[in-house]
Image (cartoon, rainbow, N blue to C red):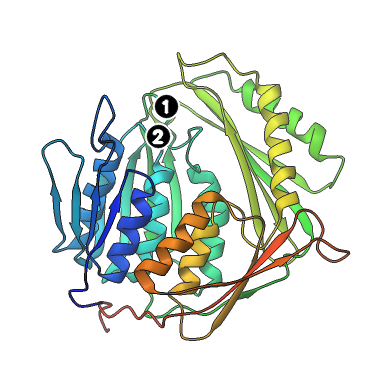
Amino acid sequence: MATQAHSLSYAGCNFLRQRLVLSTLSGRPVKIRKIRARDDNPGLRDFEASFIRLLDKITNGSRIEINQTGTTLYYQPGLLYGGSVEHDCSVLRSIGYYLEGLLCLAPFMKHPLKIVLRGVTNDQVDPSVDVLKATALPLLKQFGIDGESFELKIVRRGMPPGGGGEVVFSCPVRKILKPIQLTDPGKIKRIRGMAYSVRVSPQMANRIVDSARSILNKFIPDIYIYTDHMKGVNSGKSPGFGLSLVAETTNGTFLSAELASNPQGQGAAVLPEDLGRNCARLLLEEIYRGGCVDSTNQSLALLLMTLGQQDVSKVLLGPLSPYTIEFLRHLKSFFQIMFKIETKPCDEELKGGDKVLMTCVGIGFSNLSKTLK
């Protein structure tokens, strides 16, 4: 870990997770001012405070100072400790919001992480647990993070606004990461999906499946969408339904899309047929964007490339999302690392939208706190 490095200073509430995660990995303290200072309800929101509490649980010796109004935050990271943890997430954001941060930190703990997260499993804002399970876990495996203790299990589903879902995430620790060369996405060979419904008629999921297939069947025959209807205590506290779709390519790349129904009492009711069709179109849009990593996991791939051995890593991405662009700026300020960015216009070989080839040399980050057995 870096010794007492000089602290970085930011203003505003945007990209709070990025800053805290990178601060924890680099060991550099971070100070964030003017968090919603001009808002009617100033300061940190509940879901952000919950994320900070989660970081406090998985680290040892972190120092967190928040002023009275919650508009200024000082975070001095401790050592990543891991172990068995339980955390109740805020129901304002889904468990995916917390898992995205954990996926970045989990491989670098002292003890393998086994965490139970409770809250909302699927909502309309963050990537759902289904999508992270289908796309982020195979991505981590490319970097050499694998083992029988590596899993993400949905025990209960919870829809907003009530929540009541529960997932278990366990991840082994690694001393170093492998560099990757993901430059050929390959062709789509199959599409898998999960249509879920909780506290509504089980027929909803079947209606979603039929409408999604009506669009996707024109392109590829190998489509299988599972239906998941959870009953009783496993169905959480609020009704809802949704669909997550994942396309797998011949080279083991996963591209995903998802949609969820409007939360109970908010917005107009959504027809399952419309939801299925729109989600299928979103998947086609994601396939058009293409690349070896889908748009939800771009920043995770770039972070793991940065932390790899001192060797060249390359990845072909679709158009960079604004979140990823800001993440690259943060990587530069925390780790002093720059990516070589080459645009690849679409031609005979690369179908779909314009692609970006990202190349970097890892900083040789080594997990010093990993216990030697």
Is residue 66 or residue 142 the one in the foreground?
Answer: 66
Drawn side of residue 249 relative to residue 171, left or right: right
Residue drawn at x 38%, y 28% as measured from the top left: 233
Would you name the residue on which mark 1 appears?
160
Residue 173 appears in the figure: no
The N terminus sits in image quarter: bottom left
* Quadrant of res 261: top right
Q: Amino acid at mark 2?
A: Val
Drawn side of residue 350 relative to residue 107, left or right: right
Position in image of residue 317 (x %, y %): 64, 62
- Disc 2 to disc 1, how far (Cα)? 6 Å
* Quadrant of res 56: bottom left
Residue drawn at x 40%, y 50% as measured from the top left: 99
Drawn side of residue 118 relative to residue 271, left or right: left
Residue drawn at x 55%, y 26% as measured from the top left: 241
Position in image of residue 132 (x %, y %): 51, 51
Drawn side of residue 301 relative to residue 34, left or right: right
Image marks 2 and 1: residues in contact by CB distance under 8 Å: yes
Q: Secondary structure at mark 2?
A: loop
The image's mark for residue 120 is 2
Disc on the earlier residue, 2 or 1 = 2
Is residue 33 or residue 348 the one in the foreground?
Answer: 33
Q: Secondary structure at mark 1?
A: loop
Is residue 42 or residue 352 the one in the foreground?
Answer: 42
Position in image of residue 39 (x %, y %): 29, 29
The image's mark for residue 123 is none
Residue drawn at x 21%, y 70% as measured from the top left: 6
